[in-house]
Amino acid sequence: MSDATAPRPTHRGIAMLRRIDPAVAASFGCILLLLLVGSLYSRSFLSPDYLLQQLKVASFLGVIATGMMLVILLGQIDLSVPWVVTTGAMMACAAAAHGTTGAIIAIPCGILCGAAIGLLNGIGVAYLRIPSMIITLATNAVAQGLMVAYTGGFAPQDSASKAMRYLATGNIVPGLPNAVLVWAIIGGAAIWLLSRTTFGRAIYAIGNRERAAYLSGIDTRRITMLAFALSGALSACGGVLLAGYASKAAQSMGDAYLLPSIAAVVLGGTHILGGRGSYLGTVAGVVLITLLQSILSVMQISEAGRQLIYGAVIILMLLIYGRQKL
Amino acid sequence: MTEWRYWLSEQRGTLLAIGIFVAMFLLYATNHPAGFSANMVQTAANKATLLAFVAMAQAIVVITAGIDLSVGMILTLTNCLASWIVVGTATETALGVAGVLGTGIVCGMINGAIVIFGRLQPIVTTIATGAMYYGIALFLRPNPGGSVNETLADALTGRLFGVLPTSLVALAAAALLIWVPYSRSVVGRAAFATGSSEVAAYMSGAPIRAAKFVAYTLAGLLSAIGGLFLTFFSYTGEAAYASGNAYTLFSIAAVVLGGVSLMGGRGSAIGAIFGALAFRTIGDLLFVFDFDPLWQPLFQGLVLMLAVSIGAFGLVRVRNRLEWFG
């Protein structure tokens, strides 16, 4: 009996192919398709310079989407991304304005502010049992209110510290932008966290059925709270990188990251109701969305057309392979 | 006697919303520098009806346990469209109004069709379609401008018999003509049934799909009425991302304040209307008490957060811990 089911060496390749998530394969296929379409439009699409530049732009979204993925795996959602990103950027810049000490604590300060908002989300979702969609919208509004009150309604005058700029635009390894390196480190940590730690397994378990996870002895409330705090910290980290990239923070810099971060995670094959998904898929989703945005802007389509095509393509892709089972 | 108590417990959320609004408005009216006058009521009513229409839209969808994050963008889109076509002679204006309302209905139908037949999550769907609607709005009005039939606009934002604000009459008419027949119809009841338990509704043969489809369609229609009124007040159309987003956010706040359960199945559009009126009054209270306008977003965010946390008090009554997980 066991002989019949054990994979013979010749079938091992087929077995490996079967193990690949169709959604992940589909999104990698879409990336190749986009590159093909792009290269038909312009030769420079396949040049290493262009691809590295895209990877650098993708890394901001990648860091934010990592946090979003943790939360979506739980079966929740984090809609506070726009203003947590902005808060991270503004607070880091604000700290950077305070001399040498400020420049040193700028990056941790921004990230910790995001983690604090995320913690608030987590407490609301895990301990007060408020639907995540609602509490994160509320904290988003509070973060916006705090930032508007802080900046006085004008564009903040503080600029990013040297370290932030270096982190977003410099190269430690020649040819490889630091931002990509940051994403690679965070991505590696996420893969390790999700597949090698009890924390990661607990996240999948809660996403599948929280009640069962609780009954099997997992402290589901603590895990949920921590995941939201991590999501806040990672969103803010994305904001810090963005502020370093633009060398300043702006009021609506986070607005452009809510839909893409959710779309990247879902397009990458993570189930929106939680419990299933791999980080590799999220990487594919992030690259896919960045390429799509880039091609639309290279084709010089107006902002209006871009929003329209962008929304339509995301719905279309989800209809093709992201549908929930009945 | 028991019949009466049943009705009371069913309407508790709505009655609470009315109570909150009356208390808020009395506080506002008695502290208003200009004193309690028909003029003051008219201004307050005109500002609040916009949100009330969008809140009604949101409530109808939330009752089916869905959510529509595109209501603000439908409002923006119809606002831009109305600034083009609601002009000219009486016939042209009438056709224009019909066109605007029809657009809202189509937007709602698209949302409904994708959610029902595409089997995508409402939250992802409506964020993506919201981006599309915003894109179309940008096509129509990249810069603020346009005009509207001023006779109609003044008639609908003025006062009836010199006392009653016409916008409130229009709001009441919409509630009577749309909400009351809907909530008493088979489809409306099916919407409530779907919201409390989709499986149970399915097994008892309720028309789930029709209920959801009609809910999203009506939400589109009501948002379009909101957009039409926005044009009547401002005489212009403007594709403003931030304002569209704010309407979506505030509609959820109004729905929560109005006693509509975000889990679905409980509440009424009437409650949402009073929730919207109360929420707007809260914002205005700050001006009456001479707060810096910069603190308004923070204050509204905190009120929203407080409102969503109210539901957590139910946890105190939970005897069995497994009930936490629903």
Image: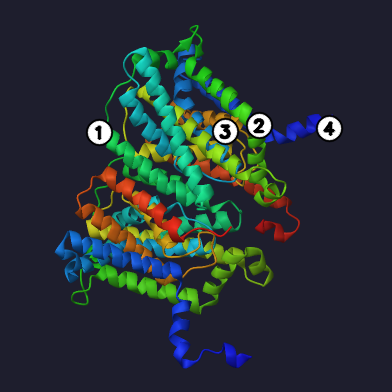
* Circle on res. B2: 4
Dot 4: what SS? helix
Which of B280 and B272 lies nearest the eye of the viewer? B272
Amino acid at pointer 1: Asn
Dot 3: what SS? helix
Report how far apart the C-alphas of labels 2 and 4 lie in the structure.
24 Å
Give the mark nearest the N terminus, 1 or 3. Answer: 1
Find disc 1 in the rendering and name its residue: B143
Q: Chain of mark 3?
A: B
Question: Are discs 3 and 4 both within one chain?
Answer: yes
Find disc 2 in the rendering and name its residue: B185
**B274 relative to A80 in the view: left or right:** right
Give the mark nearest the N terminus, 3 or 4. Answer: 4
> Residue at image x 37%, y 18%?
B93
Residue A5: percent from the left, percent from the top?
58, 87
In the figure, residue A141 lies in which quadrant? top left
Give the mark nearest the N terminus, 4 or 1. Answer: 4
> CB atoms at circles 4 and 1 under 8 Å apart?
no
Amino acid at pointer 4: Thr
Quarter of the image containing the N terminus of chain B? Answer: top right
